[in-house]
Amino acid sequence: MKNPTTPVLRPLKAIRAKCLDCCCYQRAEVRACPDKTCALWPYRMGHRPSPTEVKEATAALDTLHSRKETGAKI
């Protein structure tokens, strides 16, 4: 049985809530988040990211994975 006091969040709102939690509920910190390797980074603002943001985040993840594969320091 569901708890009637627990709100059901849509996926983008849930991601935004997680990002706020990660940044101590500071909206400016969410906007300035430097962790582009986080899978939630493109969605942190609570809306669908632009293609540019997705490419930027994907490039950061690809760089991180290639460094791990070659054994380079991160």
Image (cartoon, rainbow, N blue to C red):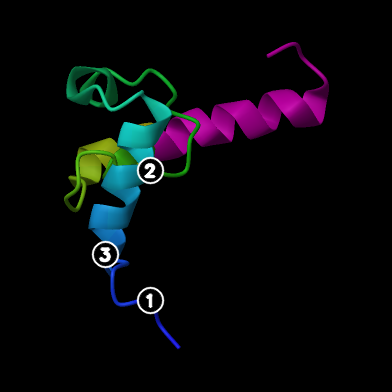
Q: Are marks 3 and 1 in contact (CB under 8 Å)?
A: no
- In the image, 10 versus 67, the foreground residue is 10
Q: Nearer the viewer, mark 3 or mark 1?
A: 1
Report the residue marked by disc 1: 3
Determine the main secondary structure of the stretch shown in magenta: helix
Q: Is residue 72 above or below residue 50?
A: above
Image quadrant where residue 24 sits: top left
Q: Is residue 57 above or below residue 35?
A: below
Which residues fall within the magenta stretch?
57-74
Residue appearing at x 37%, y 34% in the figure: 21
Mark in the foreground, 1 or 2: 1
Q: Amino acid at mark 2?
A: Lys
Per the model, the C-alpha gap separating discs 3 and 1 is 14 Å
- The earlier-in-sequence mark between 3 and 1 is 1
First in sequence: mark 1 vs mark 2: 1
Identify the amino acid type marked 3.
Leu
Is 5 located above or below residue 58 in the figure? below
Measured Cα–Cα span from mark 1 to mark 2: 20 Å
Residue denoted by label 2:
18
Residue 2, image x, y percentages: 40, 82
Q: Residues within 10 Å of mark 1 (few under 14, many from 20)?
A: few
Residue shown at 48% from the left, 35% from the top: 38
Q: Position of residue 15 (x, y in %)?
A: 33, 50
**Real-space CA distance between mark 2 and mark 3, rounded to the nearest whole angstrom:** 11 Å
Q: Is residue 54 left or right of residue 2?
A: left
Residue 64 belongs to the span the image colors magenta: yes
Query: Residue 9 got which mark?
Result: 3
